[in-house]
Image (cartoon, rainbow, N blue to C red):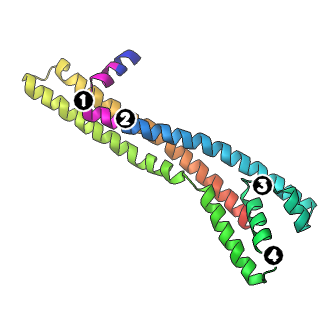
Amino acid sequence: MNGSVFQLILQAGYIVKGVLIILLFFSVLSWAIIFFKQRYFSKAKKESEHFLHSYRTNRDPKSLYHATKNLSLSPIANVFKSVYTDGAKRDRSEIKRILRRYETLESVKLEKYLNFLATTGTTTPFIGLFGTVWGIMNAFHGIGSAGSASLAVVAPGIAEALIATAVGLAAAIPAVIAYNYYLRMAKKLIIEMED
């Protein structure tokens, strides 16, 4: 079966091959983002827990800053460190403004690359559908050229059409699942940071 699918891809027209290459690009990049974000969120969560533990046991800002200086992925620690260094010798309203600014910057970091997953989830089924339509058009062209609607004439065009659909869905489904999962994780860390 795998050999026949690979043969169908090799025998597909240039448009369908182009569609499959585009879908492969989206899929590979989506999986790279999925693995990157998994590591990122896992480390950020651990660092945030470490920071909160340090905060609960040591309320002195200077020693807390030195104890958590190496935490680079925790949004809570990053906001604290930024406000600690940038907000020294400032009045309360200016510190609040700086705090909001750094919270926004950390929120953007947490949601970075998630838009690509959303784009992949929404566009790749349509790109696959374009390949499907093109493959079906080739099947009808084959019918017209051969003058008959035998299975041998129709099957290659329909098969390449279905492969384009399947690849489009294979790219979209993991991207949508990962987008929703990581967006929820980002929102959770943002709420913790705001608290």
Give the mark toward the camera: 4 or 3.
Answer: 4
122 over 168 or under it: above or below? below
Give how far across and how far down residue 182 sits, in percent.
Answer: 60, 50
How would you rate the neighbour count of disc 3 (Cα within 10 Å): few for under 14, some for 14-19, many for 20 or more?
many
Judged left or right of residue 81, residue 125 is left
Q: Nearer the viewer, mark 2 or mark 4?
A: 4
In depth, the one of 28 and 81 nearer the eye is 81
- Compare marks 1 and 3 and give the one earlier in the sequence: 1
Query: Residue at the location (19% across, 19% down)?
Result: 151
For the C terminus, the quadrant is: bottom right
Q: For the magenta stretch, what is the residue range?
A: 7-20
For the N terminus, the quadrant is: top left
Q: Which residue is mark 3?
A: 48
Number of dots carrying numbers: 4
Residue 27, percent across and down?
46, 38
Pointer 2 residue: 21
For residue 88, the mark is: 4
- C-alpha distance separating marks 4 and 1: 65 Å
- Indicate the secondary structure of the residue bearing disc 4: loop
